[in-house]
Image: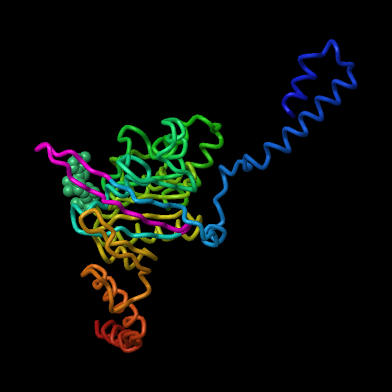
């Protein structure tokens, strides 16, 4: 209707008097604006969603409905890696996926962005069923789902700037100035602003993983999928990286789903956790809600870690005054 009106004034210029044509054009433009505005949110490329708004939203950002994935083995047999699994992850959560090697954790994570297409079931992210999307729609929707891997997967011949800018450039919708601003914003977020012109080979493992996080965040995803992001890092670097992930979750409200075999990662970072065995979800719980009735050994181990942390928090701090006194005596002695 609105486009007809504004187009009509162009196409039928000879039969439209100037004032009437102008009236139709303005009316058409007005109606077009009114109709489109609610459909397309204002571009929010340079701003992050409010974390409070994100957490306040109770709707799951990820919903897996009876997903199933099998692989054909060289022997001709079929192996069920994920079996009729349903799962919901709330917006703003930090959600851990744990289980033994081969339990199906990575396969499940890759089902969320359809790197693995399920044989059956539905995958909803941000309310859209990804299994129904065309190839192009899926490519666009994946901008909403960042992913980082154990081995960082950076472009070795590109600088840190170009690595982070990469997902923005290939989608071609952003000006040079926007890309420049966004890359700096993301590098600031992971504390790597000063490395903008260096190459991956000149970075430590932890720094490479931060670049990977910055790259994953560049298109402003709602969801960040992490497959064993700390496995290649030492304990100290792991701790720093977990702090970065927690910081990102709190500052920008991005939902984090993390696959890990390190229970300490779950205990430090995650609010909720799901335990997988042989492609099935065996139990799921809030990490800070210890219980005697966990079904799995892994669940009980997580509880034990949480309880130990609580005990340590209650215990009195070591007598620092005495230590300081002793240090002073030792210094005086020298
Ligand atoms: N492309 C594939 N072809 C055949 N089998 C596969 C394929 N991908 C995964 N599998 C099998 O599916 C099962 C689950 O694999 P997955 O990588 O999801 O396990 P995981 O829990 O991530 O294990 P890990 O902790 O060792 O990374 C494994 O037995 C694996 O061998
Ligand atoms: Mg894996």
User: What are the residue bounds of the magenta stretch?
Assistant: 69-92
Where residue 167 sits in the image (x, y, percent)? 43, 36
| Quadrant (top left, top right, bottom left, bottom right) of the N terminus | top right
Magenta residue check for 72: yes
Give me the residue at 37% from left, 56% from top.
Answer: 87
Q: How many marks?
A: 0
- Residue 289, image quadrant: bottom left
Query: Nearest the camera: 178 or 148?
Result: 148
Rendered view: 295 above or below 212: below
In the displayed structure, does residue 150 sit left or right of residue 145? left
Rendered view: 186 above or below 300: above
Outermost residue to the left: 75
- Residue 301, image quadrant: bottom left
Give the prevailing secondary structure in the magenta stretch. strand
Give me the residue at 31% from left, 89% from top.
Answer: 322
Query: Nearest the camera: 240 or 26?
Result: 26
Rendered view: 257 above or below 306: above
| Quadrant (top left, top right, bottom left, bottom right) of the C terminus | bottom left
Rendered view: 75 above or below 332: above
Question: How has the structure been colored for display?
Answer: rainbow
Where residue 308 sits in the image (x, y, percent)? 29, 79
Where residue 311 sits in the image (x, y, percent)? 32, 83
Give me the residue at 36% from left, 85% from top.
Answer: 314
Query: Nearest the camera: 43 or 20?
Result: 20
Where residue 107 sits in the image (x, y, percent)? 27, 47
């Amino acid at each position: 209707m609105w486009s007809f009106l504004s187009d009509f004034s162009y196409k039928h210029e000879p039969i439209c008097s100037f004032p009437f044509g102008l009236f139709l054009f303005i009316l058409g433009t007005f109606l077009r604006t009114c109709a489109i505005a609610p459909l397309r949110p204002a571009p929010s490329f340079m701003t992050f969603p409010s974390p409070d708004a994100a957490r306040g939203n109770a709707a799951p950002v990820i919903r897996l409905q009876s997903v199933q994935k099998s692989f054909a083995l060289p022997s001709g047999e079929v192996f069920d890696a994920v079996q009729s699994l349903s799962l919901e992850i709330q917006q703003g959560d930090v959600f851990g996926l744990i289980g033994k090697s081969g339990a199906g954790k990575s396969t499940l994570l890759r089902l969320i962005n359809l790197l693995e297409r399920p044989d059956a079931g539905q995958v909803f992210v941000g309310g859209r069923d990804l299994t129904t999307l065309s190839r192009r729609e899926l490519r666009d929707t994946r901008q909403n789902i960042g992913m980082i891997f154990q081995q960082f997967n950076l472009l070795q011949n590109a600088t840190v700037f170009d690595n982070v800018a990469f997902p923005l450039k290939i989608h071609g919708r952003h000006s040079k100035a926007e890309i420049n601003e966004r890359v700096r914003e993301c590098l600031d977020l992971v504390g790597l602003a000063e490395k903008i012109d260096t190459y991956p080979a000149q970075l430590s493992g932890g720094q490479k993983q931060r670049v990977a996080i910055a790259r994953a965040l560049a298109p402003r995803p709602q969801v960040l999928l992490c497959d064993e992001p700390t496995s290649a890092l030492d304990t100290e670097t792991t701790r720093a990286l977990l702090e970065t992930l927690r910081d990102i979750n709190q500052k920008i409200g991005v939902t984090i789903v993390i696959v890990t075999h390190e229970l300490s990662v779950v205990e430090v970072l995650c609010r909720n956790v799901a335990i997988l065995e042989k492609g099935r979800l065996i139990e799921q719980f809030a990490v800070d809600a210890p219980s005697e009735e966990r079904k799995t050994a892994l669940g009980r181990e997580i509880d034990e870690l949480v309880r130990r942390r609580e005990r340590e928090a209650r215990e009195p701090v070591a007598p620092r005054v005495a230590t300081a006194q002793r240090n002073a005596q030792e210094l005086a002695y020298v």
